[in-house]
Every structure is written in structure tokens, then in C-alpha cells.
Image: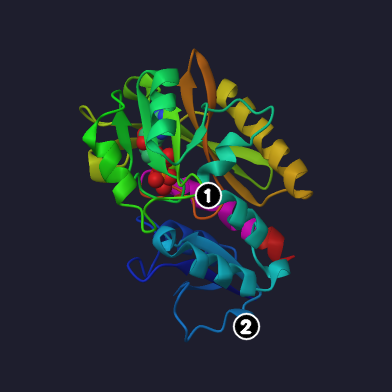
Amino acid sequence: MTVLLATCADLPHGEPGSEALDAALAARGVDHAWAAWDDEAVDWDAADLVVVRSTWDYATRAEEFLGWTRSLDQSRLLNGADVFSWNHDKAYLADLGTLPAVPTRLTSSPTEFAAAIEEFGTAVVKPRVSAGGAGLIVVSDPHDPRLGQTLRSHPTYPPVGGPWIAQPLVESVRTHGEVSVFVIGGRVVSQVDKLPAGDEVRVHEEFGGASRPVPIDPVVAEVASLADAWLAERFERPLDYVRVDLLLHDDEWVVSELELIEPGLYLDVLPANADPFADLVVARLG
Ligand SMILES: Nc1ncnc2c1ncn2[C@@H]1O[C@H](COP(=O)(O)OP(=O)(O)OP(=O)(O)O)[C@@H](O)[C@H]1O
Ligand SMILES: [Mg+2]
């Protein structure tokens, strides 16, 4: 049985700390290799299972990436191309039905940006397709020049189709941080809390943020389980892995993002996350 773990050219051996996943797979007798998703020399059909792991460069080449996921045998791919297609565009955040989530508006014009600022006071504007917090701005003035720059940065200016989302700035990100809850094979397995530094709202290490594993908080675990169940209904099958990111908004933990493509497992600070993930791989190999 061979498993191919899809990564990107910049991370040939996966995310920081991925030796833990290598070890967990080896301990279970799983023969595996890392391969960049866009490496044309790779024979993906030869794998018994393809696992999308750290394809962190896909946001700037989304159509190419999604085309690649569609070209794979879907019965031997975790989560699946339909899930990836839905999840790569943050417009899904405006379409979560009964799930508690950060209020999200699709925005494509100065008028819509102004309406979002009017509604939220201070708004977070971010591209619908992005990763690593790229292109995110915090604005409270509809005449803020950065909004114009954001508009003009769009490849097909004037933009069509609402290429950004706007949300209220959830202030508690500075105190309570953003929480990631991992649901693997339908089970809540772990939690990582992430805090930004200084004036920044982005929790990423590149922006000075810090992540640490914490015991599972039953309140956030319940929201994560709700999200997992909602997704199972939406896709008419249980998902293999789900990372639910949450923010504390108006005293309630709500979904800020569902990471269903290539969620970081934070293996550098939580190497034990490799075990449930390796168990999932073994279960799917059958
Ligand atoms: N509405 C918000 N209120 C407060 N902070 C926010 C809000 N939206 C995003 N952030 C902060 O900005 C970070 C990046 O936003 P988001 O995760 O939506 O972007 P991303 O480009 O998909 O990043 P990643 O790929 O790492 O998930 C979040 O992790 C969070 O710290
Ligand atoms: Mg995020």
C-alpha cells in the first residue's frame, strides 16, 4: 500500500514538524512519500491513497489546483475534489445556514465596501481566495486609500462577482485569539489556540503570532462537531478531516473558517496530532 502526501515545491517534506507524521505512518506500516501537487513526473494513479497535506501555494493558482484534484481517482482521495472546490472560496462563509459563523458579506465595489463599514463599524476585508492572511486589511473609513488599492489590485479591474468578503473585526482575536479544533474521522481530537502579536489581527507566525496546544474546550468542541455534522449533510457523506477555526464573537464561539483542503496540523507544536491523522489514513486504506 502506497500513500502519496501532496505538498508544494517550497515544502518538499511537508509542513514544519511533519517528521511526526512520517513516524506515525511508519509505525503503522504505511509506505508513503511526499510529492509536490504540480510535479508532472508524479504518477498519482499508482497510489492507493492521495492525501492533500501542505499544498500551501494553491491560492494563486486555484483553477489549476482544483483541476488537478478533479483529475485524481476520487475514491482514493481524502475529502474529495467537490469539497475542495466549495471550500477554496471563502464565499462559503456566507452560506453556512444554521451554523454559528462570523457574519460575512460578499463585496465587489466601493459602495459595497462602504455598506459593510456602515454595518460593522470596523471591517475586515479579505480576498475570497487566499491563504496565509494575504491581502487582508482592517478598515473603518470608506475612503481609506487601501480600499482603492485593494480594488485596483484585482487582475480584472473593475472587478466582477464579489472577489472579497467583509466581516466585522472580531476584537476578541487580540485577547482570546483564534482557536483551531481538529475533527478527524468524525472525532474531535485536539485544539490549538493562536494569538496575534501587537496591533496585528493575523495569528500567523510570519506576523509574530504564536500557537499552542491546549486541552479541548467542550464549548468549542461542540461547535466543531456541529460543523462536522453540517458538512456531512451538505456533502452527503462524512468528511475525513475538518479543521474548524473559531473566534469569540458577541460572547459566542463561532466559525471563522472551515479548513477542508490543506489545514496545517501544527505538528511543530503538537506532534501528537500525527497519530489520529495516521489512524485516518490506515482506516481509509481499508
Ligand atoms: N473578522 C475577523 N476578525 C478578527 N480577526 C480576523 C478576522 N478575519 C480574519 N482574522 C484574522 O486574520 C487571520 C487570517 O484570516 P483568514 O484565516 O480568514 O485568512 P487566510 O488567508 O485563509 O489564512 P489561512 O490560510 O492561514 O487560514 C485569521 O487567522 C485571524 O487571526
Ligand atoms: Mg485561517
In the picture provided, is 153 more to the left or to the right than 237? left
- x, y percentage for residue 115? 44, 25
Q: In this picture, is 178 found above or below 258?
A: above
Hey, what amino acid is under mark 1?
A: Asp
Corner quadrant of residue 151: top left
Residue 169 appearing in the image? no
Hey, what amino acid is under mark 2?
A: Ala
Element type where label 2 sits in the image: helix
**Residue neighbourhood size for the residue with mark 2, other residues' Cα within 10 Å, grouped as few (<14), some (14–19), many (≥20):** few
Residue highlighted by disc 2: 46
Q: Which residues are magenta?
A: 269-281
In the picture provided, is 281 more to the left or to the right than 173? right
Does the stretch in magenta take in 273? yes
Residue 89 numbered tag: 1
Farthest residue toward the bottom?
Answer: 41
Element type where label 1 sits in the image: loop
